[in-house]
Image: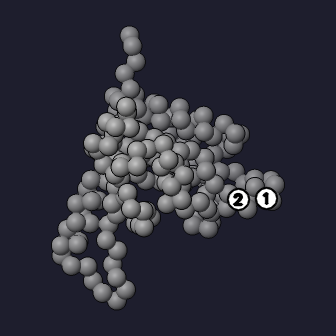
Amino acid sequence: MVQEILTDYELIVDNSEQLRERPSEYKEQKRYYSGKKKSHTFKNQIIVLPSGKDIVDVIVGKPGPKSDINLFREGHKGFDPNQRFKGDKAYEGELSIKTPTKKPKKQELSLEQKEKNKELASERIFVEHLIRFVKIFRVASERFRLNPRKYEQVIMTICGLVRLRIEALVLPK
């Protein structure tokens, strides 16, 4: 039932990476090393309603080198096949996600394409704001020094606090 209601919206999706302590075991080091950040990281994906009214889905604690689009494809299975999304250029190639137009090599984008990209960016900004709300908590922004097995629990608790802050989650009195 909730999936049917969500298909009325174009959900917004984005990822963030958080540094973690370097694992002691070589295989785990290799698994979590992100070449993009040149460090060992956890990757989190957040999906929100348009205008940032609520957090719909969170995928937490995946290894840093996993690409954004592969992380989305793994987590997308829980959504209706007709569900539409908006994302950044990292999601290019996924049919259900509307992404900005990429500048062709040695060419420029037309004014119309630039305007569409700006419009998409102004619609996507709400997911960036919610990621910022999560990262206001130091445990979610700095290097994660706690037990890595507690990472998901900590981030999900922070997401609950963010939902409380944006008044998407109302506690009974």
The picture quadrant where one finds residue 89 is bottom left
Instruction: Identify which residue is drawn at 29% across, 59% down.
Output: 121
Question: Where in the figure is residue 15, as x and y percent of width and height?
Answer: 48, 54
Judging by the rendered image, the residue that carries numbered circle 1 is: 27
Residue type, label 2:
Arg
Question: Where in the figure is residue 166, as x and y percent of width and height?
Answer: 34, 33
Q: Dot 1 lies on which element? A: helix
Q: Name the quadrant of the N terminus.
A: top left
Q: CB under 8 Å between callouts 2 and 1?
A: yes
Image side of residue 90 versus residue 32, left or right: left
Image side of residue 97 versus residue 152, left or right: left
Q: 163 or 37, which lies in front? A: 163
**Image disc number at residue 59:** none
Residues packed near mark 1 inside 10 Å, few (<14), some (14 to 19) or many (20 plus): few
Question: Where in the figure is residue 41, as x and y percent of width and height?
Answer: 62, 55
Residue type, label 1:
Lys
Q: Is residue 127 visible?
A: no
With respect to residue 172, does 59 lie above or below? Answer: below
Residues packed near mark 2 inside 10 Å, few (<14), some (14 to 19) or many (20 plus): some
